[in-house]
Amino acid sequence: MTDAPMPDKPVVREGGTPDLFTKFDPLIKQREDLLATGQQDPFSLVMEKVESPTVAICNGNRTILLGTYNYMGMTFDPDVIAAGKKALDEFGAGTTGSRVLNGTYQGHKECEEALKDFYDMDHAMVFSTGYQANLGIISVLAGKDDYVVIDTDSHASIYDGCAMGNAQIVAFRHNDVEALEKRLKRLPADAGKLVVLEGVYSMLGDVAPLKEMVRVCKEAGAMVLVDEAHSMGFIGENGRGVAEDQGVIDDVDFIIGTFSKSVGTVGGFCVSNHPKFEILRLVCRPYVFTASLPPSVVATAETSIRKLMHGSNKRAHLWENSKRLHGGLRDLGFTLGTDTPQSAIIAVIMPDLEKGAAMWQALLENGLYVNLARPPATPANMTLLRCSLCAEHTAEQVSEILGIFEKSGKAVGII
C-alpha cells in the first residue's frame, strides 16, 4: 500500500528509462516538507542504549518506552537471557537452513512443544517471523475456488497473505458481526471459506467480538483463523488471547501469533487441533523456503512462553496500568481510540500528521517514546500516537507518562 496515486504513465528519465520511483514522489515530498520544519524523523529513531523493558537512552536522554509491544516485559528476564546464551554457546549463531532441510534443531521442537502446552493444542508450527506466519498459512489454506473473508482493518500481513494466494477475497466492515454474516451468506454454500480475524487490532487497540463472529462463521461452514499477536500473554485466564477470554478457543481452527510482542524475541507461529495440520510443513512456502530461527532465539522463546504460563500477576498489573493510563489521558482531554481500555494498546488520536509529528517530538524531548502511526497503516485516514504498555511499567512511571503527555499536549496545542 502507498499514499501516492499510481501515475497514468511512468515518467521517462533522460535516456529513455522509466523512473519506477515516480509513484512515491508525493510521499517523498511530504517527508521532506516535514523534516524541513526541523522535525526529527519519527520513523528513524535510534536507541543508543536499552536499559530495561521500560527505559532506553534516545538522543542522549533517558526515555520511558511506551511504544515497544513488550507487553509482558520479557526481553530482560534473567531466565530468558540465560537460555539464549546457553543455546548460542552450544549450537552456534544460526542454522543456515530451512526447517525442512537442516534447519530443525532440538530447540525448534522444544519451542513448538511449549506452544502446544501453552495453548493446549495438538500442533504448533514456528515461523521466522509473525508476518511470515500469516503470509504462509493464509496463502496456502485457501485455493483458487475458495474464499478468504477479512476485516477491513486487518494487518498488512493478512492482506499480503491474501495477495499471495489464489483465493477470492471478501472484506467486511470492521468488527461488524452483521456485515460478516451478510458476506458469508452471499458465498456459494459448497465453497471453501476461511475467515481471518484478529483478537486485538493493533492501531486502536480494540477487541473483536469473537464470540458472535465465530458463531456466524461456523453456521456458514467457514474455518476460522484468529491472529492473537497483540493479546497473547495477557488476555484470557491463561493468557491465550481473546478467543480464550470469550470462550471460543475450542471453536477456532487456527491461531496465529508472534514472538515479537509478549514473548519478547522474534518469530511467529500457528497452532491448531486440525488432524491434517502437519502437511502444511511441506506446502507452506514461507516455511519451506526461509532459513529457520537461530537456536538462541527459539531457546529464549521457549523459556519465555513457559514462564508466561504462570504470568497471572503480571497480567493483572498490566491491566491496572492500562486502566490508569486510559483514564488519565481521557481526563486530560485527549481523544482516544476506544471509550474504555480494552488491551495494552491505547491510541491517542491526533488532528493531522503535522500536529501528530509535533506532539511525537515534544513527547520524545520530554522523555517519552511512543509510536507515530499514519495512513495508510491507520484506519479512517487517522494520524495517531500509539501507546503500548508493559507489565514492567511501575505506577510511578505511569504517573510520569501522564505528566509528560499533559506538558507536551499543552505546548503543542492538542489540549
Image (tube, helix red, strand yellow):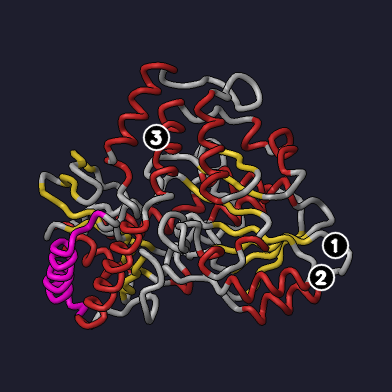
Which three-letter amino acid code belongs to the residue tagged 2? Leu
Task: Look at label 1 and name its amino acid.
Answer: Ala
Cβ atoms under marks 1 and 2 closer than 8 Å: yes
Find the distance from the CA under tag 1 to the CA under tag 2: 7 Å
Q: How far is disc 1 from disc 3 in space, using C-alphas?
A: 41 Å
**Residue at label 3?**
300
The residue that appears at 35% across and 69% down in the rendered structure is 347
Q: Residue 167: percent from the left, percent from the top?
A: 76, 55
Say which element carries label 1: loop
Q: In this rendering, is residue 174 above or below 389?
A: below
Q: Which quadrant would residue 51 be assigned to in this image?
A: top left
Query: Which element carries disc 3, helix, strand or loop?
Result: helix
Residue pointed to by mark 1: 191
Q: Quick check: marks 1 and 3 in contact, CB under 8 Å?
A: no
x and y percentages locating residue 17 in the rendered image: 56, 38
Residue 317 lies, with reference to residue 327, above or below; the image says above
Dot 2 lies on which element? loop
Q: Amino acid at mark 3?
A: Thr
89 relative position to 110: left or right: left
Q: Which residue is mark 2?
A: 187
Q: CA distance from mark 3 to mark 2?
A: 44 Å
Residues in magenta, as a range? 392-415
